[in-house]
Image (cartoon, rainbow, N blue to C red):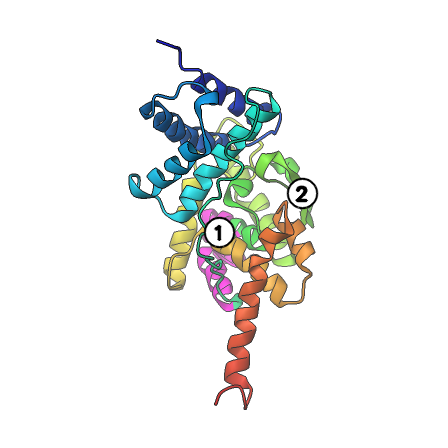
Amino acid sequence: MTENQIPKLVDAYLRHLTIERGMAKNTIAAYRADLARYVAFLETKGINSPGQITELVITDFAESLKVTSGLISSSVARVLAGVRGLHKFWLLENITPGDVAAAVKPPKSPRNLPKAITVEQIEKLLAAAGPDPADESAMAADPIRVRDRAMLELLYATGARISELINLDLDDLVDPTLVRLFGKGSKERIVPVGGYAQRALAAYLVRTRPTLVGKGKGTPALFLNQRGGRLSRQSAWQIISEAARVAEIPGEISPHTFRHSFATHLLEGGADVRVVQELLGHSSVATTQIYTLVTVDKLREIYGTAHPRARR
């Protein structure tokens, strides 16, 4: 029986993404899982070398993702993106003479606009997370929630992803007005920190972090848990969920809600889309432009209710 060459060639592609492209561990894990589906499908077809794969085989694979696996369009598109990348890599490495995946188009996903909440709701969330930095007695009574307030203030002030926030070290605070974030593929960007977040961070660094760091083995992490270690992603989610519950904000509030609200509120305030792109760390302005659709919808809604001749 001929040895199956494909798993080794998939591993070579994943190494390329890790070493040459510098992709994050979580991204590589997602690619690995998606390509494992592809390898398993090829095995069911008795295919054990790249030369046996045709455009029809890939089209059948895409169909099987929808019919057999029941994946939604966006998930099918994600898996196919990995397959297309794999075949392009094989072509560039002269493993195959052509790219049979190039013409296979992913299904179009319905455009889901990001869900932002209002400035008033953000303010309620922040107030529910912890005491105001100006309230000395409240901060003294509940120092852990001083951390929670600082974390959410920084999340909204910078539009950071939750992974970027929990991975912050003290050295990433460039100065009180700037923070260094590391996005997808370890891309670095410097983002301004507003006055409210500056005060909340200063209160946390003075009142809470020294006590927390004393409970652990010493860590450069900015946000610490009650054992003195780096705060986890799950704990950050719980802090946000609890603040949303206390603030009585309807719907699901996630860390990304802060990112969506950050971008939407900036654009509504007149910020240029390319500035917002830079702040969010998007590699393409097209990714950022989806937020302009949100603000246009808001404008349309306001126009419809306010203009005397907007409705018949």
Dot label at residue 309: none
Q: Nearer the viewer, residue 258 or 20?
A: 20
**Image position, residue 77 (x, y; %):** 45, 43
Describe residue 192's horizontal placement relative to residue 144 as left or right: right
**Residue plotted at (61% across, 34% down):** 186
Mark 1 highlights which residue?
Answer: 256
Can residue 74 be seen here? The reply is: yes
Q: Nearer the viewer, residue 83 or 279?
A: 83
Q: Secondary structure at mark 2?
A: strand
Describe residue 53's horizontal placement relative to residue 65 as left or right: right
- Dot 1 crowding, Cα within 10 Å, few <14, some 14–19, many 20+: some
Q: Nearer the viewer, residue 149 or 310?
A: 310
> Is 249 drawn above or below residue 145 in the view shown?
below
**Residue plotted at (55% across, 41% down):** 164
Mark 2 residue type: Arg
Describe residue 275's horizontal placement relative to residue 168 as left or right: right
Place residue 93 in its image quadrant. Answer: top right
Q: Secondary structure at mark 1?
A: helix
Q: Nearer the viewer, residue 140 or 190?
A: 190
**Residue plotted at (38% across, 53% down):** 242
Question: Which range is magenta?
Answer: 120-149
Mark 2 highlights which residue?
Answer: 189
Can residue 229 be seen here? The reply is: no
> Is 3 drawn above or below residue 293 in the view shown?
above
